[in-house]
Amino acid sequence: HIASHMDHSCQPNASIELNEADQTVTVKALSEITPNQPITVAYLPGLDCLDKDARQISLLSKFGIVCECAACQQ
């Protein structure tokens, strides 16, 4: 549930790795993140392979959100 505390983006600037063995979470930057820029993660894996409508349907049904990231505004 840690990802729900970060903003979603279909083109995220970070990823989350969960280590269940030692109960740690690692957030890794996927691109440069500037000061005051939100850290964004993809709530669902493989979203980049889907078109906008399919991403929107998946996110709405799974998380109840309508994505308004840059990829979905194009």
Image (cartoon, rainbow, N blue to C red):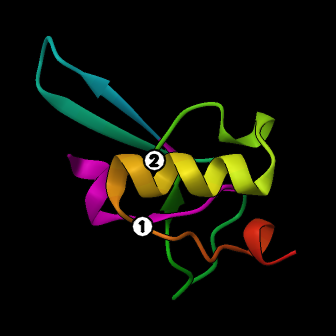
| Residue drawn at (59%, 62%) of the image | 9
- Number of other residues with Cα within 10 Å of mark 2, as a class: few under 14, some 14 to 19, many 20 or more: many
Q: Is residue 4 left or right of residue 15?
A: left
Residue 31: horizontal and vertical position, in percent? 72, 55
Q: Which residue is mark 2?
A: 43
- Number of other residues with Cα within 10 Å of mark 1, as a class: few under 14, some 14 to 19, many 20 or more: few
The disc placed on residue 46 is none
Check the image and name the residue furthest to the bottom.
36
Check the image and name the residue furthest to the right.
74
Q: Report the magenta residues as a range.
A: 1-15
Q: Is residue 16 left or right of residue 31?
A: left
Residue 10: horizontal and vertical position, in percent? 66, 55
Q: Is residue 42 visible?
A: no
Check the image and name the residue furthest to the top.
21
Question: 33 or 54, which lies in front?
Answer: 54
Q: Is residue 19 left or right of residue 10?
A: left
| Residue drawn at (81%, 47%) of the image | 51
Q: Are marks 1 and 2 in contact (CB under 8 Å)?
A: yes
Q: Nearer the viewer, mark 1 or mark 2?
A: 1
Q: Quadrant of the C terminus?
A: bottom right
Residue 39: horizontal and vertical position, in percent? 49, 67
Question: 31 or 58, which lies in front?
Answer: 58
Question: In the structure shown, which secondary structural element does the residue marked by tag 2 occupy?
Answer: loop
Answer with the quarter of the image where residue 33 lies. bottom right
The total number of labels drawn is 2
Check disc 1 and give the amino acid type: Ile
Q: Is residue 52 above or below residue 37?
A: above
First reached walking from the N terminus: tag 1 or tag 2: 2
Q: Which residue is mark 1?
A: 65
| Residue drawn at (48%, 53%) of the image | 59
